[in-house]
Amino acid sequence: MINENKIFDIVIYGNGLSAKSALVALTKQEYKILWINNINKEEHDDRTTMLSPVSVDFYQKLNLNNLRSIIFPTKKILIKTKNQKNFTTFEDKKFQKPLCFLAENKFLHKELNIIISNQKKKKNFLELNEDIDKLNSNKNYNEIILKSGKKIRSSLVIGVDGANSLIRDLSNIKSKDKGIKKYGLVGLIEHDQTHPFTSWQVFSENGILALLAKENITKTRSVSSMIWSLDKNQMTYLFNLDKDDFEKKIKNEIGLNLGKLSLISKISKWPIKRIDVSNPIGLRSVVLGDAAHAIYPLAGQGFNLAIGDVIELVKTLNWARNYGLDLGSSVVLKKYENKRKVWVNSITKLTDGLDWFFTNTSVQTQNIFGTTLNLVDKFDTIKRKLLETMVHN
């Protein structure tokens, strides 16, 4: 039973990977936390994501014991446009360290759920499986009114509840909904050219196709995770193809580099919603992850942005606590916003720019992009800067 007069340090709302990551990270810091988790909204997640080394380090510090057994490193990324003859290669030649790691979302959920279950048994946080009706905020605290009529008070509310964020709406945080213009197709591809620890990405008028290194089954057979970002018409056409024709389309995009290709899983599709949020903070509230910046997928940048949000918020709240500041005060939340806005805006503009370019320009113009990649391939300094961006996001 929750005392309605008790003021929690933090209320976290959401139940996706970003919400669970925020819960585990903040619980580790020993804040008084209430997790409002509407379990009816959780869906089966058969997608994959690319974790940056920073995100992997974050999860290791949270003690995800089986993390190394559920992620697959990429040490080399090959990128080109469809009509470009050769791929531009990105790799850490000096130290041969991974640039990123493939993770299946369902296994990340499983690992986080184990930690959350243990923390709950130790009573490190409280959980409610309800939904929020209203959010009333004043200079002293938030009052959260649940659908059941229960009232909860907190210094800070954190919304990690996706692109259609309830907390963002209740907090009157302004957003610009750009709608669903892209869809993702995901599946597993087996191929007989192995290329260990290598991921591939092709930009073309047919969307952005990524084949992400997963595992070598044998010395001559490998599996890659396919993520194909497309407009609605392209997605519908490809989704309805039979297996053989779909495999031909992939081979037409990627070329002969992977040898014989076979689709070894069902194809799943999901809508990609674009949301812009100029300022992710409200009165005693903040939104993270897709609730703050739902972007087009590019090498897992969207999820890594969410982990970056969590990392920076933990730092900011710890700073506030060390100086005896109110966790939900405008001074604290503004500090967090200032720390994140430049990087978030930069990645958003990059992903928007690439999407616009390959949606609205001619094949001839797109070939210029391929020429640029060829030039990048000749200048190690430029490649190192791009690698630093990938690794340190």
Image: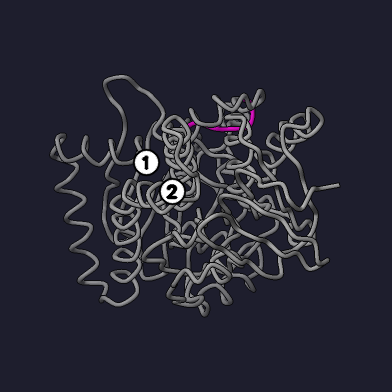
Left or right: 55 in relation to 5:
left
The residue located at (50%, 72%) in the rendering is 172
Q: Are marks 1 and 2 in contact (CB under 8 Å)?
A: yes
Asked whether 247 falls inside the magenta stretch, the response is: no
Q: CA distance from mark 1 to mark 2?
A: 7 Å
Specify the farthest residue to the right. Answer: 1
Q: Which residue is mark 1?
A: 393
Front-most of 162 and 85? 162
Seen at 47% across and 39% down, the residue is: 317
Is the residue 246 above or below the residue 128 in the image?
A: below
Residue drawn 63% across the image and 66% down it: 135
Q: Quadrant of residue 220?
A: top right
Check disc 2 and report its element: helix, strand or loop.
helix
Classify 30 as above or below 105: above
Q: Quadrant of residue 43?
A: bottom right
Q: For mark 1, does the 10 Å Cα neighbourhood hold few (<14), some (14 to 19), or many (20 or more) residues?
A: some
Query: Is residue 391 among the parts visible in the rendering?
Result: yes
The magenta region covers: 69-73
- Depth order, front residue of 333/98: 333
Three-letter code, disc 1: Asn
Helix, strand or loop at label 1? It is: loop
Say if the magenta span includes residue 72: yes
Question: Which residue does the numbered mark 2 point to in the structure image?
Answer: 305
Residue 258, image x, y percentages: 47, 44
